[in-house]
Image (cartoon, rainbow, N blue to C red):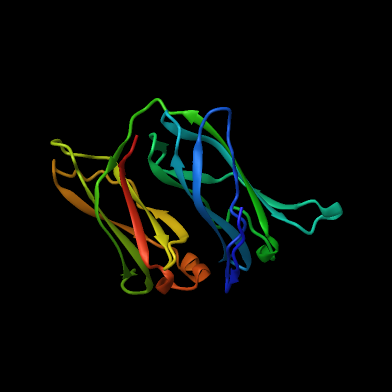
Amino acid sequence: MKKTGLAVLCALLLIPALALAAFGKIDTVQSHILIAPCDEQQSPVGYWEIKNIDTVALELQTAQVDWKHKGGLFGKDELLGSDIYISMYPSMLKPGETGYLQSFRGSVLLDDASAIDTNELNIVWQTAYGDSMQLPVTAATTSQGEFLNGAYATTVIEVTVQNPTDDTLFDYYAVAGAYDAEGKLLFCANSARNDVGIPGGGQVTLRIIVEPEILEAIGGPEKIVKIQGLGYKAL
């Protein structure tokens, strides 16, 4: 594990080790824990970039992250809260494929989330028996978007995915990892599932709206320097 410094409204915490089941070799490429505002409280939000280094396709069975404070009694970590609302994008990883895990803002609310200085992520994997298809990404960029007749403005990530088949493709979506100038993961976000068909060989651009609270927690949209986009067909 490694430590990183605290920033305004943003805490980079210890990178957690994944506690794996008897099978399921997943490498944690890097992680980022934000402390984001949520109503009048604060909420820890976790993002993990992962890679399947196993020989079989894997999907998430159960997951839990424990948010802890080192200053507990008798030198033990004090449990401040646990979060079981963790999603994986894509929902299945074939050997060698990269994806993301994300816990969600507001799942755990604390009066002072800055007290969190350790975290432990426990994962149970299961062999995936379905099939998936990662789609080629031809572009991944950010822009400023306005919604509700200009009343709501935030950063938008646009990921252009291509249909590599000869048939019309349905049920696809995209996930984007945002990185800073040093290549460190800031957060990830995913688009809605889309049922508008992409003709064979064609492409479509998907928009992903970034929560303003997440932008505030990373220190502003100017922190985003690189976008890594992934497109995939839903199982």
Q: Give the number of marks.
A: 0
Foreground of the two, 37 or 15? 15
Q: Position of residue 188 (x, y in %)?
A: 43, 55
Q: Position of residue 97 (x, y in %)?
A: 38, 40
Front residue (pair 16, 145) = 16
In percent of width and height, residue 157 lies at 33, 62
**Image side of residue 75 versus residue 110, left or right:** right
Image point (75%, 57%), residue name: 70
To which quarter of the image does residue 114 belong?
Answer: bottom right
Quadrant, the C terminus: top left
Position of residue 121 relative to residue 37, above or below, is above
| Extreme residue in the right direction | 74
Residue 141 vs residue 107, the one in the foreground = 141
Residue at the image position 20 percent from the left and 52 percent from the top:
204
Q: Residue at x 58, y 31 (%)?
A: 21
- State whether residue 54 is above or below residue 117: above
**For residue 41, side relative to residue 183 (left or right):** right
Residue ID at (17%, 37%): 165
Q: Residue furthest top?
A: 129
Q: Is residue 102 left or right of residue 196?
A: right
Does residue 213 appear to the left or right of 135 in the view shown? right
Which quadrant of the view contains residue 73?
A: bottom right
Q: Position of residue 192 (x, y in %)?
A: 35, 50
